[in-house]
Amino acid sequence: MERPTPGGAEGIVWNTNATALFDTKSTLSSPQAVPQTGSNLANMFLGVSWYQNTLSKGMYYLRDKDYAAYVQDTFKATSA
């Protein structure tokens, strides 16, 4: 897999082992591919890929003061 680049880079990588041959000398718990098998173009046509997205967190000011005024009105309208 490709190394992520800082600053919010994203990318699709097609070099999976989806089209590679299974090495019969490896175990089922740790499967390995036969060297020189598999095709990145075939992986693309099958839609099998790795997706990576690196997000960089910016500065956020989550605490700030907020002022508001409140006036209570207790006036009653009467017919006089």
Image (cartoon, helix red, strand yellow):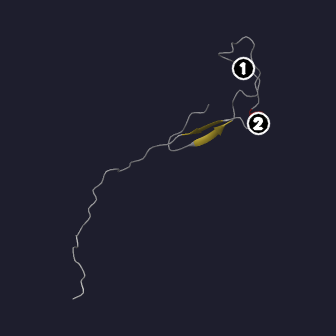
> Which residue of the protein is positioned furthest toward the bottom in this rendering?
80
Location of the C terminus (image quadrant): bottom left
Determine the CA span between mark 1 and mark 2: 18 Å
Residue 78 at x, y = what percent?
24, 83
Location of the N terminus (image quadrant): top right
At label 2, which amino acid type do we have? Leu
Residue 58 at x, y = what percent?
42, 47
Marks counted in the figure total: 2
Which residue occupies the foreground of this view, 60 or 5? 60
User: What residue is rendered at 69% in x and 15% in y?
Assistant: 28
At label 1, which amino acid type do we have? Ala
Mark 2 burial class by Cα count in 10 Å: few <14, some 14-19, many 20+: few
User: What residue is rendered at 71% in x and 26% in y?
Assistant: 17
SS at mark 2? helix
Question: Which residue in the protein does label 1 denote?
Answer: 33
Mark 1 or mark 2, earlier in chain: 1
Residue 10 falls left or right of residue 59 = right
The answer to which quarter of the image holds residue 45 is top right
The answer to which quarter of the image holds residue 5 is top right
User: What residue is rendered at 76% in x and 28% in y?
Assistant: 19
Question: Which residue in the protein does label 2 denote?
Answer: 46
Mark 1 burial class by Cα count in 10 Å: few <14, some 14-19, many 20+: some
